[in-house]
Amino acid sequence: MPDADIDHIYDYKPEYLTDILKSVKTIAMVGASADKTKFSYGVLRVLHETGYDMIPVNPNPSLTAIRGLKVYPTLQDIDRPVDMVQVFRRKEEFKAIAQEAIDIGAKVLWGQIGVYDDDAAKLAEDAGLKVVMNRCPKIELFRPFWKPRLDLAI
């Protein structure tokens, strides 16, 4: 059941994010890039190396693999169940991707930093998906290990 009290920009309880990152195994990354200078490539690399089954999604017909992982042109073309859809696209595309995530039976819709749309969140939550927006799973995955040193000189 969706949590109507979640403020999707600022108020994710650490337990909510931790539960998602511990429970998902297969992540379809919409907007994956083979360009090593792109943030989506780095996130895909770290999540893959951490043990997630990463599925790159990119409609470019000349892009068939990223890091040895088969690239799918759309979410509907994926040949196995997907736990989480991670979105590296413009926020204007988020609602349509939310519907696609619902259609393939994903459990989580995750909008990367800058990807935020209240209508997309409502659509997905009403369909029973957990939603995270404007956050990076790579950052959230390692956040518990950060030990800020505010006493260091600049």
Image (cartoon, helix red, strand yellow):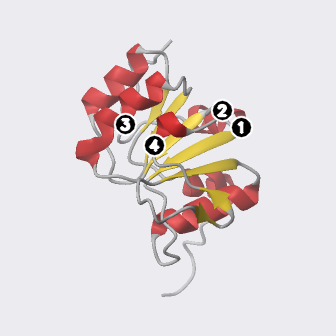
What residue does disc 2 label? 19
Marks 3 and 4 sit apart, C-alpha to C-alpha, by 10 Å
Do residues under tags 3 and 1 come within 8 Å of each other at their CB atoms?
no
Do residues under tags 3 and 4 come within 8 Å of each other at their CB atoms?
no
What residue does disc 1 label? 22
Q: Which mark is residue 101?
A: none
**Element class at badge 4:** loop
Q: Residue type at mark 3?
A: Ile
Tag 3: Cα neighbours inside 10 Å, few (<14), some, or many (≥20)?
many
What residue does disc 3 label? 97
**Element class at badge 1:** helix
Q: Is residue 110 above or below residue 99?
A: below
What residue does disc 4 label? 74
Foreground of the two, 36 or 134? 36
Residue 95 in percent (x, y) is at: 29, 33
Tag 1: Cα neighbours inside 10 Å, few (<14), some, or many (≥20)?
few
- Tell me which numbered mark, 4 or 2, is placed earlier along the sequence: 2
Do residues under tags 2 and 1 come within 8 Å of each other at their CB atoms?
yes
Residue 111, quarter of the rendered image = top left
Tag 4: Cα neighbours inside 10 Å, few (<14), some, or many (≥20)?
some
- Tell me which numbered mark, 3 or 1, is placed earlier along the sequence: 1
Residue situated furthest right in the rendering:
51
